[in-house]
Structure formats: structure tokens, C-alpha cells
Amino acid sequence: MGQESSASVQVVFQRAERGDASAREELFALLYDELHRLAHTHVARARGAMTWNTTTLLHEAYLGFAHREGLQFPDESRFLGYAARAMRGLVIDAIRSRYTEKRGIDQTFVPVAEAMLASVGSPEEVEQLNDALADLARLEPALAELVDLAFFCGFTFAEVAAMRGVTERTVQRDWAKARLLLHGALDRT
């Protein structure tokens, strides 16, 4: 994104921050390519476990938060992080729905969050990872956001550093800390 384009995005973020409803639609249009890349990452990680395509996921996520009151996006990383979490939730819901249909309505449902993971574990491991991520979000929200951006959104450390206005080395240190906290939480379970 060029300097002029980046400045125009910042103006739109400022308008959205002041409550301008049309600003969210502009953000969607301005960041469409990046949002499409995020959606593609989520669909690819689902590895055929869901029937939605990239564009459907992107538009469903947008519809889920476009007109919701009280959401604030002070910058691009927060906006993309929120969009990534919305997409992740939709993918998990779509997979749950599909597996529930396959197993029948009276069957016990096992969470299928592994669609978002690079490697598939047992349902218990997936549930433990989701709990660990929720704990991390309560303890260190910035580190949880980093996990969203780097792991779930697929941003490189350099891209995350640019979004946050820090050095790549700082992002690497934060990533190491996030991994340690997640591993510690998983070891306790």
C-alpha cells in the first residue's frame, strides 16, 4: 500500500472511530484484497471440511460485523484481527453444522476447531488449544492479537511489525512469549 493510499485508509479509520457508518463500508472496499487473502487462508486451512468458498466467507464475515454498533477499529491491524476472528468463528460454525448434519441431530457434537489449525489433533487437544487461546486473550490481549494476525491471518512478522509500528525483532520476541504462554497453558491441562 502506497503512502497516499495508507493516508486515505487512516482517514477512513478516523471517521469510523467517530461513528461514521459509511466508513466501515469504505474500509471493506479499501482492504478488500487483504480481507480476501485472509478468507482464502481460512478456507484453505479448512481443507475441504466446509463447502463455502473464499468470497462467501469474506462476505458473511462482513455482514456479521458491518452494522454492529459499538465496534471500534482504531487501525488496520485491529480491523483485520477482528475480521479474522469473525471468519474463524464462521468456519467453525459451518464445519459444526456440516458434521452435525452428517451425524444426525441427536448425536453429541464434538468441536471441530481443527479446521483452523495447521495440524489436526484430537477433539480434546483442539478444545484445550481454544481454551489456551481464550486464556491468553484475557492475560495478554496484544499477544492473542499477534497469534490471530500471524497464525490465523497468515501475516508475516514483517507485516505485523509494520502494522504495529514496531520492529520485526519485537514481534519475534512477542511471538516467542505467546508460544511459551500457550505451551504452558496446554501443559497444565
Image: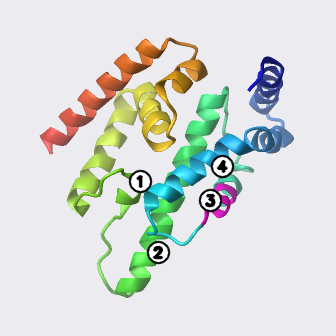
Q: Is residue 33 above or below residue 160?
A: below
What residue do we see at 28% from left, 55% from top?
126
Q: Decide: marks 1, 2 in contact (CB < 8 A)? A: no
Q: Decide: marks 2, 3 in contact (CB < 8 A)? A: no
Amino acid identity at mark 2: Ser
The residue that mark 2 highlights is 97
Marks 3 and 1, how far apart in space? 14 Å
The residue that mark 3 highlights is 54
Asked whether 150 falls inside the magenta stretch, the response is no
Marks 2 and 4, how far apart in space? 23 Å
In the rendered image, the residue lying farthest to the left is 188
What residue do we see at 20% from left, 41% from top?
186
Asked whether 56 falls inside the magenta stretch, the response is yes
The residue that mark 1 highlights is 116
Q: Residue 105, position in %: x, y?
A: 39, 86
- Image: magenta residue range: 53-59
Amino acid identity at mark 1: Met
